[in-house]
Image: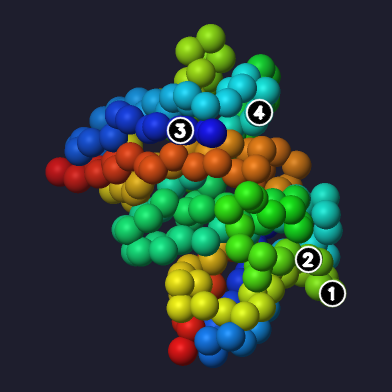
Amino acid sequence: QAVVTQEPSLTVSPGGTVTLTCGSSTGTVTSGHYPYWFQQKPGQAPRTLIYDTSTKHSWTPARFSGSLLGDKAALTLSGAQPEDEAEYYCLLSYGGVRVFGGGTKVTVL
Amino acid sequence: EVQLVESGGGLVQPGESLRLSCVDSGFTFSTYWMSWVRQAPGKGLEWVANIKQDGSEKYYVDSVKGRFTISRDNAKNSLYLQMNSLRAEDTAVYYCATEFRGYWGQGTLVTVSS
């Protein structure tokens, strides 16, 4: 099965910008992998922020955006807020199989 | 509004079985693929299995193939995960989720321990 890679941890200053990436061991991530991004805070269920590369949910703050960046999927947080401190996971599709990345712990400091 | 509620978790011994259920009360359940995802204590998310709208296609992570079976009953808006030959490493919170727009339930805890 494919391996999906994410940065283990990133730190961003309040109001700053940070980009999380999601790579695939099989090569370039494309829209055909239907990238998803999830946010999870301690003790809570995950919440979907972005699906199909760049589509936001109704509850997704405008400061989050999804894209393809080089050979990876990317989640950009612009104007970080203290409440954005969380674990972020990406998910890629390989035909019928889905694979999560290992998660990125984002600290707002 | 989509609402997914999982049930069926609990404490079982290694080698035993458990059946998880997920009921949707908020959307057209029969029109979407559905997934089970798990999270071991202190670990990341792991996709476990999914099933097509009509149940004709099912996929599994390698570690559960031959032990877990995903199924659905569209008439009951329900998703199931039959887990056999459980191991300690199956201990996790199990979530059901839609594969359209990614709606999640709150999860149910499965603990496999002697």
Labels 4 and 2 share a subunit: no
Residue B90 percent across, percent down from the top left: 35, 45
Secondary structure under the numbered disc 4 in the rendered image = loop
Residue B13 percent across, percent down from the top left: 20, 37
Above-or-below relation of A80 to B36: below
Label 1 environment density (alpha carbons within 10 Å; few <14, some 14–19, many ≥20): few
Labels 3 and 2 share a subunit: no
Q: Amino acid at mark 1?
A: Gly
Which residue is rendered at x = 61% and y = 87% of the image?
A: A16
Give me the disc on residue B49. none
Instruction: Identify residue for label 2.
Output: A67
Q: Amino acid at mark 4?
A: Tyr
- Real-space Cα separation, disc 3 to disc 4, in angstroms: 13 Å
Label 2 environment density (alpha carbons within 10 Å; few <14, some 14–19, many ≥20): some
Labels 1 and 3 share a subunit: no
Q: Chain of mark 3?
A: B
Secondary structure under the numbered disc 1 in the rendered image = loop
- Real-space Cα separation, disc 1 to disc 3, in angstroms: 36 Å
Does the image show residue A35? yes
Instruction: Identify residue for label 3.
Output: B4
Labels 3 and 4 share a subunit: yes
Q: Chain of mark 4?
A: B
Which residue is rendered at x = 53% and y = 47% of the image?
A: B47
Label 3 environment density (alpha carbons within 10 Å; few <14, some 14–19, many ≥20): many
Instruction: Identify residue for label 1.
Output: A70
- Real-space Cα separation, disc 1 to disc 4, in angstroms: 31 Å
Q: Are marks 1 and 2 in contact (CB under 8 Å)?
A: no
Q: Chain of mark 1?
A: A
Location of the N terminus of chain B by quadrant is top right
- Real-space Cα separation, disc 3 to disc 2, in angstroms: 28 Å
